[in-house]
Each structure stands twice: as structure tokens, then as C-alpha cells.
Image (cartoon, grey):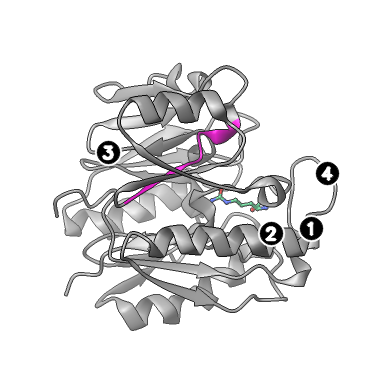
Amino acid sequence: MLNHSFRFTHAITRRPSASIIDGLRAVDVGAPDLALMQAHHADYVVALRSTGARVVELAGLTAYPDSVFVEDTALCLPEGAVVMRPGAPTRRGEAAEMAPHLAALYGEVLTLAGPGCIEGGDILTTETEILVGRSARTNADGIAELVRLVTPWGHTVREVLTPPGVLHFKTDCSVLDTATILATPRLDASGCFKGYRVIHTAPGEDACANTIRFNDLVIMPQGFPRTADTLSKAGYNIRLVGNSECAKLDGGMSCLSLRFTPRA
Ligand code: CIR
């Protein structure tokens, strides 16, 4: 399907719940403010909807503090969805919670059975391949199982490495269009984007590499003016959304949605 890596008819989001203060974080920089996170989340949903997509907003799940970060629960492809098996034990139940919502919209929903694990944040789907970064949350067994599941759909999976100390592969990169990736210089230096046009985040702005191209918009976190300017000058239509509260939990723009076009 043409432009399947950035043109989508649907998205699924989940509202943050009050338990978000218990979400996982690498470094404790203070509790997120629920009201502010809800306001940012609402802006994010408005941005997705403004492109004409149908956006399903699921209710918050108190039992799963990190469940606002729905991206980690599935890989959505035009042919079907694959429900993930998150590496973080406290997040594993989130995937099962997502499965029926995907099943309602998709013809085919597969499940990563394990024992390996993958979190969706480690998966970058480009126009030509699916890059999966091994990380503290995603391992070789999980990637091998994913290969078995999506190869029959005609997809090519390439195993890459999430840099040490970085939560997810996509913490450091995003798809901008069919040939272009936004990446931090540290991730690009690993050589994993050979053959792509790569735009680097500006010095000191690594934290905006997690951005999303969603239809005609590039939705970026607020507060990274030099990278925003570079992307704007390169012709992208930038929409800024506040991310201060999700950032306290190592989350960003991609984590907050599953984006897809189910095959009719
Ligand atoms: C976690 O550590 O799992 C959450 N606090 C953040 C998840 C961010 N998700 C993503 O990058 N896809």
C-alpha cells in the first residue's frame, strides 16, 4: 500500500489515568501533573483528527499506569495487527487490553506468544522495511517470532540496536516520508539508516526525535525550536503538542497512538 508508513485512516489512543504518577521512568524528575497531561493529550487527539482520521479514544486504565502509551501494545500493518508482548512485566497486561479493540477494526489480529518480547516503541515501519531495535524491552526471540508472523504478509524485518541507555529505538527516530528519517546523531552514527535521507535533530534537541508523521502533519513535542525550524524549511507541516508530562515518564509523540489503515 502506497505511503503506508505515514498515511493512516485510523488511530487508537488511551486517556491518561490518575495512576500515571506510578508510571515507569528511567530517572525520577518529579511526578507528572495529570491535568496538564490530559490537556496535552486532548491537543494531540485534536491534531490527529484534524487530518481527517478516525481516532478512537479509549478510557484510562487505572490498573496499568503506563497504558496511555498504547504504541507499545501492537504493531499495526495494512494486512493486520500483531499484539506485542511488552518486555516490562508491569505492562504485559496492556497488550491483552488492546487486542479486542484492534480485532474490532481489523480483519486479522495475531499475537506474539513469547517467550520473547517486543514493545512497539522499538519498531520503526518505513515504506520498505520494518526495523526492530533490540533493547532492554525487546529481545532477539521476540524479533524472530515477529519475522515468522509478518513475513507471510510480504514484510521484511531488519534487526537493529537501540542505543544503550535509550528506552526504545523510536525514542531516537521517526519516519518523515517515504525516504526520510528524523534521527538523533547518536542513532544515525550506528549506520542503521544507510540508503535513507536522514535529517538530524539539532544539538541539544535529541528529545524531539520522537515525532510522528501522520498524514499531512508532522506532530512534534513543543520546545525544540531549531529542529522544528529545520523541518519546516524542509517543507513539512509542523504541529506542536506539549509533552512535558509524558517526558517525565520517557514518553513522546509516537507512544501515544497506534496508527493504521485496516485493509477493507
Ligand atoms: C515505559 O517506561 O514503558 C513508559 N513509561 C514509557 C513508554 C514510552 N513508549 C514509547 O516510547 N513507545
Label 3 residue SS: loop
Q: Label 4 to label 2, Cα distance in Å? A: 17 Å
At label 3, counting other C-alpha atoms closer than 10 Å, the crowd grade (few under 14, some 14-19, many 20 or more) is many
Q: Which residue is mark 2?
A: 37
* First of labels 3, 4 by sequence position: 4
Q: Label 2 to label 3, Cα distance in Å? A: 28 Å
Q: Is residue 109 left or right of residue 29?
A: left
At label 2, counting other C-alpha atoms closer than 10 Å, the crowd grade (few under 14, some 14-19, many 20 or more) is many
Q: Are marks 3 and 4 in contact (CB under 8 Å)?
A: no
Q: Quadrant of residue 136?
A: top right
Give the foreground label among 3 and 4: 3
Q: Are marks 1 and 4 in contact (CB under 8 Å)?
A: no
Is residue 114 something that shows in the picture?
no
Q: Label 3 to label 4, Cα distance in Å? A: 34 Å
Q: Quadrant of residue 235?
A: top left
Q: Is residue 231 left or right of residue 134?
A: left
Q: Which residue is mark 3?
A: 177
Report the magenta residues as a range.
Answer: 207-214
Residue at horizontal 72%, vertical 76%? 62
Q: Which residue is mark 4?
A: 28
Q: Label 1 to label 2, Cα distance in Å? A: 6 Å
Circle 4: residue type: Asp
Q: Is residue 92 left or right of residue 24?
A: left
Residue at horizontal 74%, vertical 42%? 26
Residue 85 in magenta? Answer: no
Residue 31 x/y as whole percent: 83, 53
* Image quarter of the N terminus: bottom left
